[in-house]
Amino acid sequence: MEITFWGVRGSIPAPGPETNRFGGNTSCVGVRSARGELVILDAGTGIVNLGKKMMTQEFGQGRGEATILLSHAHWDHIQGFPFFVPVLIPGNRFTVYGPSRSSGMLEGILEGQMNPHFSPLYTLKNMGAALEIHAVGEGQTFEAGGLKVTGRLNPHGTTKALAYRLEEKGRRSLVYASDCGYTQNGPTTEVLELYRGADVLVHDCTYTPEDRAERLGRGFSSILEAAQAAARAEVKHLVMFHYDQDYSDEQVDALMTRCRQMLDEAGGKHIKLTAAAEGLTIRL
Amino acid sequence: MRVRFWGVRGSLPSPGVHTNRYGGNTSCVEVRIGDQGPRIIIDAGTGIRKLGKDMANAEFGQGQGAAHLLISHTHWDHIQGLPFFSPLYHKGNRIFVYARQRDDTHLRAVFQSQTEDPYFPVPFDSVQADVALRELIEGARFEIGPVKVSCTRLNHPWIAMAYRLDYEGHSLAYVTDTAPFRDILFEHEFIQSPPEPGAPMRPDDARKLKVMRDGVVRLCEGADLVIYDTHFTPAEYRQFPHWGHSTPVDAMEIAEEAGARMLALFHHAPSRTDDELDQILLESRRSTRKLDVIAAKESMEVDLATPAAAAAGEH
């Protein structure tokens, strides 16, 4: 499994010299399975650059197939989709999964983004590629790109966001848990089981604990919740993700230093720590 | 009247080292009228987030501010910063939002659906500021305090509005997003593929475009500064004439004909690098003697009351 970060920011893209190193694009992670198939986690603006890369491969000739797993439908997790060029090319096929009561409702949510008041594309039907859209329920397991995928819901402010576990058969595992607004008890038992022993846990690290305390209602984690979840679930590698749009590169550096201490204090001395940055690739 | 650019990009914010100098935020322009005049903002792309933080340092942080937001159209890149505009979240602030009246629904419904569940956690109707919507019909004229505002429609999918602001003998025209007034008439239909180059237009469409173009030239007449959609290079336009954007050549043609003084290239394509923009600006300057051409960049401030050469400063 090969994991590449294309967008690591939360809420809204944050361009400017102060975000050059970690990047200003919103959430998107590309996963290439051992079988060579592509699974994309979230469709924030980072997916646009991933799309440009894909266009140099089979997707440029309308012969590509990929899976997109959406954690939820807040703008910063879907706003790159209309600008994701492979989806405009007839012949390409995408299977999209996300949390919703029904597949039709999830399609309606994606369709709402394309409404002609907001987008010159007018409707998903103008996008060219074939889209197959599936709602994912709590605890549901399915196969995508040669990976076993399981989804579990975390509370996220006024809504919920799916965390996904991706497993290569009998081999490596990745958990993607963005936008986690745990209660004060932290993750539920079921969610901890989803995270359990993962080779890589990509986890919401939107805030410092102090900023989180002031913005509890928004339903994000700080580095403290991330470190504690990683230690409790005994993962091997924690990757910080989804930084607040106002945090400069220096502030993310400081987040990482503090997160290391928090991991150590939570009993996770052996857990590797990385701060996700645009362009970073992790090979498992 | 002073103009400050907070977002100059089109389509999509474009973070990265290649956009550091001109900026990667989508469209947002601030207009300051003297020291006491009304606060006017044109468009609410991601650039409005930092403008809002700046405003919250003063009276908008205490819920004592009033601002007027003119929206060219409601495509994402012109409204996506609005939920992150902090003056909305202080009780007591008054925000007046002006945009074109819809043919199929009311404006409030459009803004409500931007932030409804499951897209955004804070619904439009729950913000603390007093937000009043003003629906505009094409050609409307109105006043914001001492500033006279006029508008005319543009050639863009689902229709955009251009605005002109006049104050104490100085004037600004904001003309984005628009295709040139030839080749294709954009209204409410989706245009699947570009027409054959040089294919004859329907006479009705050609007449409508002529009227639209005349309206834009009139809007820009004698303006100190025209801010214009120059998303495309001429080669890109030939490939994508059905996307509804213009080139610097189109912008110069209109601004020269209108006898404008300065032209700001604006709504830069997301993939355009700083170095490419330098080159486009250089070429544009070479091809006009009548206009003072600048390329809009974040933090650039233009004072319309000063001579062109000294007008554009950076902060």
Image (cartoon, coloured by chain):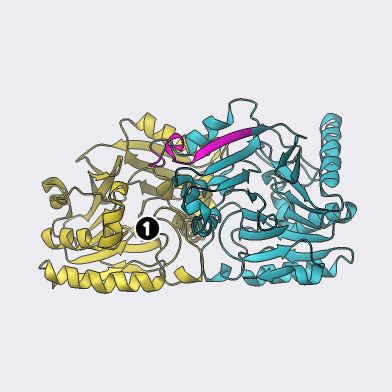
| Amino acid on which the number 1 mark rests in the picture | Gly
Does B273 sit above or below residue A79?
below
B95 sits to left or right of A264: right
B129 sits to left or right of B68: left
Residue B84 position within the rendered picture, expressed as x and y whole percent measured from the top left: 47, 50
Q: At numbered mark 1, what does the secondary structure look like: helix, strand or loop?
A: strand
Does A240 sit above or below residue B253?
below
The answer to whether one can see residue A1 in this image is no
Instruction: Report which colour depicts chain A.
Output: yellow
Residue B146 lies within the magenta run:
no
Nearest the eye: B53 or B252: B53
The answer to whether one can see residue A46 in this image is yes
Circle 1 sits on which residue? A30
Nearest the eye: A203 or A60: A203
Query: What's the magenta region?
Result: B118-134
Q: Where the C terminus of chain A falls, by quadrant?
A: bottom left
Instruction: Report which colour depicts chain B.
Output: cyan
Residue B132 lies within the magenta run:
yes
Q: Crowdedness of circle 1 by 10 Å Cα count: few (<14), some, many (20+)?
A: many
**Looking at the image, which residue is at 56% across and 45% down?**
B79
**Looking at the image, which residue is at 61% across and 25% down?**
B104
Location of residue A277 by image quarter? bottom left
Residue A1 position within the rendered picture, expressed as x and y whole percent measured from the top left: 28, 62
Total number of numbered discs in the rendering: 1
Label 1 resides on the chain identified as A
